[in-house]
Image: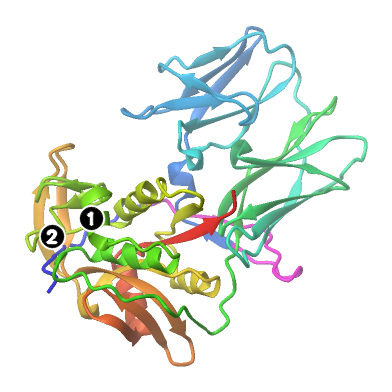
Amino acid sequence: MDLKKKLPITAPIMAIITVFALIFTDGTDIRSYAMTDFESIKVNFSCESSDKGVRVKIDDMKPGKNYEVSVSGGKAFTPVTSEAGVLFTSLGKGDFQVCARVAGEPRTVSDITVASTAEKDEEIYIKCCGLRENTYKGGGLRVEVQDYSPDETYVLIVNGGEKRAVIKDGVGEVTGLTSDYYRVQVQRGGKNAALSRSTVVYVPYKANEGGALLRKIPAVRQNPELPTGCEVTSLSMALRYLGINVDKEILADNYLPKCPYRTGDYRKAFVGDPRSTFAYGCYSEVIEKCAKQFLSVQQGRKFDVVNITGCDPDRLYACLEMGYPVIVWVTIDMQDTFEGASWVDEDTGQNITWRGNEHCVLLTGYSASRDTVYLNDPLKGSVGCSKEIFEQRFKEMESQAVFIAEVDE
């Protein structure tokens, strides 16, 4: 049996910001959504403009992070090497779109702020909507510009320049998006340059249709080779569904990040060795990294490893509707969790705790009419479970979930 135990961890207190956005579903429905974590990850910065140029500083630079800033709305970034920031000279007179991010982490991009070395013009106003994600990366955003002038040029900017689209006849669209929250602005160029306020828009996921079952996924058992390796065993099943027949031991021995027993953080590495009963396990970030490392050496095919931790259960069912089994964290036999062992992370000195009965399975189907979900359980094989109790345990385990999608080059 799986001997892992875990202590409930007090989740970080997240600022909950309710953001109202116009969401088109079937072209007419308008809704409002709450954003829980977007504000907490973006970089905060300040900028000063003068006749010398624009100086940009990162507020509250954190050790170990590499920051970079842009004065072109995200088209190009410049590293920030000190708390003094970066002084951009030779910019000339005009308006410049300033944003900042942690290098290599696009989701941390800040709002765009206009720094002007000339006289600013008036703000422009927009209406935004999210276009439902009916297939993987099949969602999008639509923006309408109020008081649109055909004599001006307009550009739709998503996540500080991560994606852009030219606006024609007052309407602009960006497609190829997954369900998520996106930060949207519109820039007007020319003599009457202006920038809209930053607005957060939600792209809804595929609507549930009552049930889905992904068949022909081999149920792989973790025992006897990996008595505490439920996470990597669930990953091996997800890969087999994609036609990649890799043994769970290969993943565990060669691709799974590990740290010695009771020495590290299970969010960064598997604590212990999955071949031993004296081990704990890991969370979604580690399995995400393991999958990416393994798939990076596969030739001729390209995959996205998508960590949707924090999602609601309906997002899991939407993934099934789109044909993707989901690696999820629950508990052994759906039992209650309890307080387990604690230790100190040798890298950070922080106290680490574990949550008892932690377990990882592959979600392969659901039925709304039967109130049932279907799982490939590394301990028991293919099983059914009450949808209600599954959702309860999923939420208790911090709503952790990962799926893998094959994508075109």
Disc 2 from disc 1: Cα separation: 8 Å
In the picture, the quarter occupied by the N terminus is bottom left
- Region rendered in magenta: 14-32
Q: Foreground: 270 or 207?
A: 270
Q: Foreground: 96 or 68?
A: 68
Q: Using the rendered view, name the quadrant where residue 401 is placed.
A: bottom left
Residue designated by label 1: 252
Q: Earlier in the sequence, mark 2 or mark 1?
A: 1
Where is residue 161? Give x, y as percent: 63, 37
- For mark 2, give the secondary structure: loop
Q: Would residue 335 be visible to someone looking at this image?
A: no
- Is residue 25 in the magenta section? yes
In this picture, residue 371 sits left or right of residue 169: left
Depicted 227 relative to depicted 126: above or below: below
Depicted 115 relative to depicted 206: above or below: above
Q: Would residue 111 be visible to someone looking at this image?
A: yes
In this picture, residue 197 sits left or right of residue 234: right
| Visual colour scheme | rainbow
* Amino acid type at mark 2: Arg
Residue located at (72% from left, 23% from top): 95
Where is residue 19? Give x, y as percent: 57, 55
Residue located at (38% from left, 74% from top): 363
Circles 2 and 1, Cβ within 8 Å, touching? The answer is yes
* Amino acid type at mark 1: Ala
Depicted 352 relative to depicted 249: above or below: above
- For mark 1, give the secondary structure: helix
Q: Foreground: 219 or 355?
A: 219
Where is residue 329? Give x, y as percent: 30, 67
Residue designated by label 2: 275
